[in-house]
Image: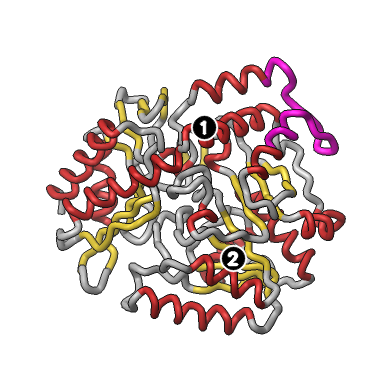
Amino acid sequence: MIKHRIIYNDASDWLFDIVKASGVYIWAKKGEKLLDFTSGWNVTNLGWNNNEIAEAMIKQINDNVYAPMETAENIQLQLAELLTDNLPKELDAVGRTTGGMEANEEAIKTARAYTKRSKILGFRHAYHGQSLTMMSIILDDNEMRAVGSRFGEMLKMEFPATYKSNMKEDNLLKYFESNLEEILNKEDVAALITEAGIITGWGSTYVAPKGYLKLVRNLTRKYNTLLILDEVGTGFSRCGELFGMNIEDVVPDIATFAKGFSNGASAIGAMVTTNKIADKTWPYTNLQSTFGWNLVGCAAAKKNLEIHLRDNIWQKSKSDGEYVRDVLISEIMKLEYIGDVRGFGMEIGISFVKNKETKEADIDLARKVMYECRKRGLYILYGDDGNIQLMPPLIIKRQDLDYGLNILIDTVKTLN
């Protein structure tokens, strides 16, 4: 869709123009005041236009705004130290990027250079960015046809989504383990890229069985395949832990960050790996980014992480998420057109179905709920496969959370 001379990724009439945003509210051009349950798709985790982050950026603007990529400025050094000090001790070498797609590109290059293998394993309809490389990881040939053939040697699996499977969780995990080992035991896969047991980027909010990430870690290590953990959506307290890797206490070989890294105040991302891997690969990977770790963005990201650590934001995310899921399960789960309510922390999916037994997605109903909630003052987003993905700002007060839930529940109950 083309609007205001800008190309959008949707042709829907739910696109709107923002005139102001603050805390957990967004104001649209037509005078609408909307309670936000999206966080800009897991970006403004600390609420829109956080004052502390703005003040840190202004201070940095008055000091210096840019450093060439062959140098490092003090705020970059401080951010690198703060970030790695709050990751597992093995992850201590940072690639500076402008966002998640670039961080994942750096991760793929690093994995191939280190293992001297070319194949990358991912999951169909996950999401790691819009570049040809990233699209090739998640889409089949027929889905790539319009933009060109697949880029590189990409292998794909079905994500072991508990909701989509008729197996018990233990059996699903064993079935997935068997399929994964069959691929990895050839010892020709450079890396497996995944989120931390949930799909956030594509909007399906599919959740894997408990133990998924530990299993993936054990098998990738067994067959000398690197594990790339995409924390772009799961990081910065979104899933009830500071980072998604903490859910099962797994240490990946490479982790990537963006979105909530600066709370939306600046374009910034990071690829973090081990000194051992970085030392053997940096001559070949060309990790250059003209605007990677812009100094003002670094100031924003540093203050953002400091707030998460100071206020234990992930604890609130975990408790609020449990509360939201409990309320939704109690109020709407028995409805014939609700297939599932699931998620981690404040990343919660509601699947709308035409048939509860077959789980056939009802995309039209999901979008209808989204449109009607918008009319009633609640901003939510349709994700994928009949799923609405709820992502409220993590600083939301219980009063606002209940207000939004009441709008959503009433809408779901009255529309069919």
Q: Is residue 70 magenta?
A: yes
- Estimate the x, y position of residue 9 in percent, counting from the top left: 47, 47
Q: Which residue is mark 2?
A: 137
The magenta-colored residue range is 60-79
Q: Is residue 43 above or below residue 155?
A: above
At a point 15% along the width and 60% down the height, the residue shown is 334
Residue indicated by mark 1:
310
User: Horizontal placement of 307 versus 47: left or right?
Assistant: right
In terms of depth relative to the viewer, which is nearer, 272 or 109? Answer: 272
- Residue 88 in view of the camera: yes
Instruction: Give me the residue at 29% from left, 59% from top.
Output: 351
Residue 73 on the magenta segment: yes
Query: Residue 398, how many percent across, how many down?
Result: 28, 34
Q: How far apart, in angstroms, are the residues tagged by discs 1 and 2? A: 37 Å
Mark 1 is surrounded, within 10 Å at the Cα level, by few (under 14), some (14 to 19) or many (20 or more) other residues, namely few
Locate the C terminus and report the quarter of the image it occupies: bottom left
Find residue 153 and report its image quarter: bottom right
29 lies above or below 237: above
In the image, residue 372 sits, relative to residue 206, either above or below, namely above
Report helix, strand or loop for mark 2: helix
Q: Callout 2 environment at 10 Å: few (<14), some (14 to 19), or many (20+)?
A: many
**Amino acid carrying mark 1 in the image:** Arg
**Residue 110 x %, y %:** 75, 59
Labels 1 and 2 touching (C-beta < 8 A): no
> Sequence-wise, which precedes: disc 1 or disc 2?
2
- Above or below, comparing residue 223 to residue 232 in the picture: below
